[in-house]
Image: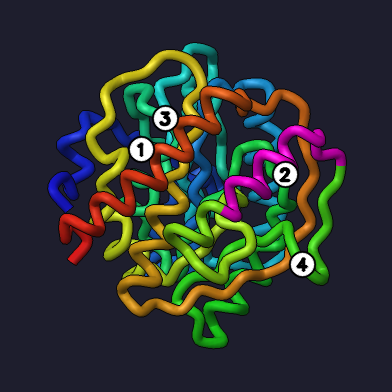
Amino acid sequence: MNDDAPASRNFEVSSRRPTTRHGVDTPLRHTQQPELTIVVPAYNESARLPHTLSDIERFIVDANLNAELLVVDDGSSDDTLAIANAHEPTTSSYRVISLPHRGKASAVRCGMLAAAGTHVLFTDADLSTPIEYALKLVEALDRGADIAIGSREGIGATRIGEPAYRHVMGRVFNTVVRLLAVPGINDTQCGFKAFRREVAQDIFSRTIVHANDDQVHGPRVTGFDVEVLFIALRSGYTVEEVPVYWEHVAGSKVQPFPDSFRMFSDVLRVRLNAARGRYD
């Protein structure tokens, strides 16, 4: 990877510490390594973020996890960063990373490389897949998978309320992806994926396609997941698809035509990079 040092990307990290019932700050990190880091990339999510953070913290309590919660603000133009910084965690180690707006690929990459947990999961800020499904992905990792990805396809998976155009977009894109880059995976684009930490460190430090993106304007949906999974399979890592519940949430940032073009271009760029030996 030519640009594998997130510090060079001009991001800022702020830390909010959980407070004990006696009002004394506890250390940001437990002396024991967190079992799980949950990375939440967020761009203009001020309306959803408070509920999302509360849901995740409730999940951490219910599952009795030693966890780290990491919000990566992708240069939001609303109050997302202020809300993230004002959040008062009660159960988990908590950090906020602030980036210039370069898109979800950059935010996810930064969060995955900064994570401290034994297992690292990223989830969309809308929690279209309920955070409780994180346990199913972690179980797959514990069974021996290097990577566990949420899948909205196949037996046991449920999709609710997805617009027809998005489903068609996704199926056409996945057909191309399986032919050109990632054979055998039915759903590369579900924004719910978990990795063993050392695997995440290896793969995300080697991504190229969006590693050096300039600042952008407005939402930016890309095919970065394809590059991640391409590197994974090329490196011999095992990938397990885990059927999940997924519900379309209003306010999607997907723009059918420009995003489709960009995602198909990303697949071609991955193949070109591979032909040039850039993933070797």
Q: Is residue 119 magenta?
A: no
Distance between the alpha carbons at the discs numbered 4 and 1: 30 Å
Q: Amino acid at mark 4?
A: Gly
By secondary structure, the bulk of the magenta-drawn segment is best described as: helix
**Whether residue 15 is visible:** no
Q: Earlier in the sequence, mark 3 or mark 2?
A: 3
Residue 163 shown in magenta? yes
Label 3 – label 4 distance at C-alpha: 29 Å
The residue shown at (27%, 65%) is 202
Nearer to us of marks 3 and 4 is 4
Q: Three-letter amino acid code at disc 1?
A: Ser
Nearest the viewer among 228 and 139 is 228
> Which color mode does the image show?
rainbow
Q: Amino acid at mark 3?
A: Gly
Q: Secondary structure at mark 2?
A: loop
Name the residue tied to disc 4.
Answer: 154
Q: Is residue 114 above or below residue 156?
A: above
Q: Which segment is the magenta one? A: 161-175
Residue 100 at what x, y percent from top left? 32, 23
Helix, strand or loop under label 4: loop
Judging depth in this view, the residue of 188 and 192 nearest the camera is 188
Q: Which residue is mark 1?
A: 106
Residue 140 rendering spot, x and y as whole percentages: 59, 78
Residue name at image x 57 percent, y 75 percent: 240
Give the distance between the C-alpha atoms of the residues marked 3 and 2, in whole angstroms.
Answer: 19 Å
Q: Which mark is residue 128?
A: 2
On the image, the x and y values in percent for residue 263 come to 47, 38
Task: Name which of mark 2 and mark 4 comes first in the sequence.
Answer: 2
